[in-house]
Image (cartoon, coloured by chain):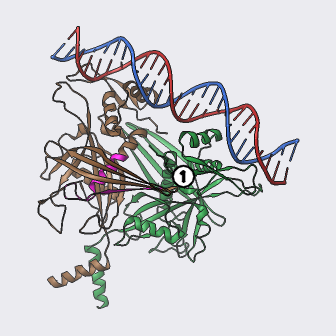
Chain colours: A brown, B green, C red, D blue
DNA sequence: GCAAAAGTGTTAAAGGTACACCCATGT
DNA sequence: ACATGGGTGTACCTTTAACACTTTTGC
């Protein structure tokens, strides 16, 4: 086939069978223990981290074809024609972390026309929770530049306008992603509109030059929200911990996810006596520390109803 | 272009640019007052209804090309190349009900390869809530066969198997969709697997000859679950009611959605005094009834936090 | 001995559950 | 008069929030 013919065929195919592409984006969470320099002991403070991948290319060179070159982005990829959507997510996760059998859940499908400036792409995001003790340094030792980033959010601004039938509330959050080498900041705008009995919430992000590629900041924010909500009434948190853990570890994890500080005594009581989510073991924590702590395990018979 | 050339081009396009199609399925809910024959007065019992559309064709004639001919299905359609996913949902909703500005929310994206036996289709489902008082008989008076069905679910069977690291629990539900003329029954299978600290829930449905088209039974079930969960902690229920309503009306709605019976006094107190979700008006219910009831309205200043 | 984390007990306020009882109105 | 739904008050129990206090261990 001649060059010209091929060109024609491509054009023809594009126009007559023009369909969006489908991709999957993975928000892979893990929880690590924060190291305190001023304290020689095993000080416990959990940090939430997510895995990002650096896209090939130079971010400073403006490229019409790919405006996201050289930027940090969520791992992900195209859905193959003969592949279940969930399988795409599992495959991407395994490719990045070499780990299978972790908690995974679908988040949201973004189908904005100009989400990707190059082509129409419909992207479904998934959230995965991996236990950092199993992970070690699988990610980041690759040819591909993949790194774990500590993630935090900060409310920058809130603007509430009262309308005839309700109100409009705009919140601006800053998403901060940091590790030893890089710090990424991006903004998310959340607009809640209440009009009569019908309320609506819209997510948006800058899609600017400085932050993450695509709408990945908004995806990460929504994953954090989902995690926060679910941690209160499901067993989701345990997917971020090793099999055996101390109650302080569990408490610190709850605190970093919800952003609230909890009372120690109440938390212990609730987890063990009231909800019966955890069960004592005969094992104890080890290492440089003050008093040794009893290790607990998740009660697999726990029912959420 | 010759016939042969066209054939070739189609094949070429299919193989080289083969992509899934994207569709949107709408679960449109409304709540109506049940009519009791044995009671002459305005007896109040809310029923949840959803809108279904009868697909063209004869269900008895086996058609390899379209095995879902003549079956009842959720309204929906293809996502246009230059159309936001949300817009597709809004468009489908308007086409079916002629109503805009209702509550709408994305549910889930099903990307199973053999979901549609004909082609690869990735389908995103949305849930919409419409106030039946605004609706009247817009749907069903069309050339297209669209009807409201009262929806109920029933747990048929539960099977729990204990495994080494947890358990597997399989539940079979029956989804019943009824109106004056038709009754549709379909089954949904929900498998919850707990293995160590990681739990997983899978939805499935028969996709058999008798029930709804595609996996629509499972989609409806998941919409019911979402509605049930959200009604407890959001203002979502008010989107199903007219602007003014009695507390009994609201209570009956909560009951039909959650499947629980509530105590009248407690419900009133909670809604008005504790949560301040509703505000008294000076208006009173009218019509054939016993004692007149005070009408309330949603408090638009209510905050879910 | 002191600092820091592990772990227990006690109390008050808030929220949920249950029920008894009065009110208004059409037949 | 009475049946039926509308509406209020009160008692009891569980959960949550807050804080005081004891125990263990490394330095």
The residue under the point 42% across, 25% down is A269
In the foreground, B179 or B260: B260
Taking the magenta stretch, the answer to whether it contains residue A235 is no
CA neighbours of label 1 inside 10 A, class few (<14), some (14 to 19), many (20+): many
Residue B119, image x, y percentages: 38, 70
Residue sitting farthest toward the bottom: B2
Looking at the image, residue D15 sits to the left or right of residue A21; the answer is: right
* Up-down relation of residue B234 to residue B68 (above or below): above
Q: Is residue B71 visible?
A: no
Looking at the image, residue A156 sits to the left or right of residue B86; the answer is: left
Q: Is residue B293 visible?
A: yes
The residue under the point 58% across, 56% down is B241
* Up-down relation of residue A45 to residue A50 (above or below): above
In the foreground, B250 or C8: B250
User: Split into 4 quadrants, where in the image is the N terminus of chain A?
Assistant: bottom left
* Up-down relation of residue A6 to residue B123 (above or below): below
Q: Which residues are magenta?
A: A199-225
**Quarter of the image holding residue A15?**
bottom left
Looking at the image, residue B154 sits to the left or right of residue A135; the answer is: right
Residue B174, image x, y percentages: 56, 54
Per the image, the residue denoted by label 1 is B237
Residue B153, image x, y percentages: 57, 52
Residue B89, image x, y percentages: 44, 66
């Amino acid at each position: 086939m001649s060059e010209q013919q091929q060109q024609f065929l491509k054009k023809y195919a594009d126009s007559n069978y023009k369909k969006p592409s489908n991709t999957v984006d993975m928000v892979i969470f893990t929880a690590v223990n924060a190291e305190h320099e001023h304290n020689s002991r095993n000080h416990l403070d959990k940090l939430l981290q997510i895995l990002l991948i650096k896209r090939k290319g130079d971010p400073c060179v403006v490229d019409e074809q790919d405006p996201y070159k050289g930027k940090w982005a969520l791992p992900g990829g195209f859905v193959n024609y003969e592949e279940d959507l969930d399988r795409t997510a599992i495959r991407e996760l395994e490719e990045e972390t070499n780990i299978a059998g972790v908690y995974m859940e679908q988040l949201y499908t973004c189908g904005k026309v100009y989400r990707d400036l190059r082509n129409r792409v419909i992207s479904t995001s998934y959230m995965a929770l991996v236990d950092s003790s199993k992970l070690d340094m699988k990610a980041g030792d690759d040819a591909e530049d993949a790194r774990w980033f500590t993630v935090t959010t900060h409310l920058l601004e809130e603007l509430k306008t009262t309308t005839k039938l309700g109100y409009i509330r705009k919140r601006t959050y800053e998403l901060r992603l940091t590790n030893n080498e890089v710090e990424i900041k991006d903004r998310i705008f959340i607009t809640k509109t209440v009009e009569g009995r019908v309320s609506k919430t819209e997510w948006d992000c800058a899609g600017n030059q400085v932050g993450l590629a695509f709408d990945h900041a908004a995806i990460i924010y929504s994953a954090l929200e989902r995690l926060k909500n679910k941690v209160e009434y499901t067993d989701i948190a345990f997917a971020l911990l090793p099999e055996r853990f101390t109650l302080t570890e569990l408490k610190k994890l709850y605190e970093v996810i919800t952003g609230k500080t909890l009372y120690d005594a109440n938390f212990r009581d609730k987890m063990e006596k009231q909800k019966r989510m955890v069960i004592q073991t005969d094992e104890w924590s080890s290492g440089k520390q003050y008093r040794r702590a009893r290790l607990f395990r998740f009660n697999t018979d726990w029912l959420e109803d």
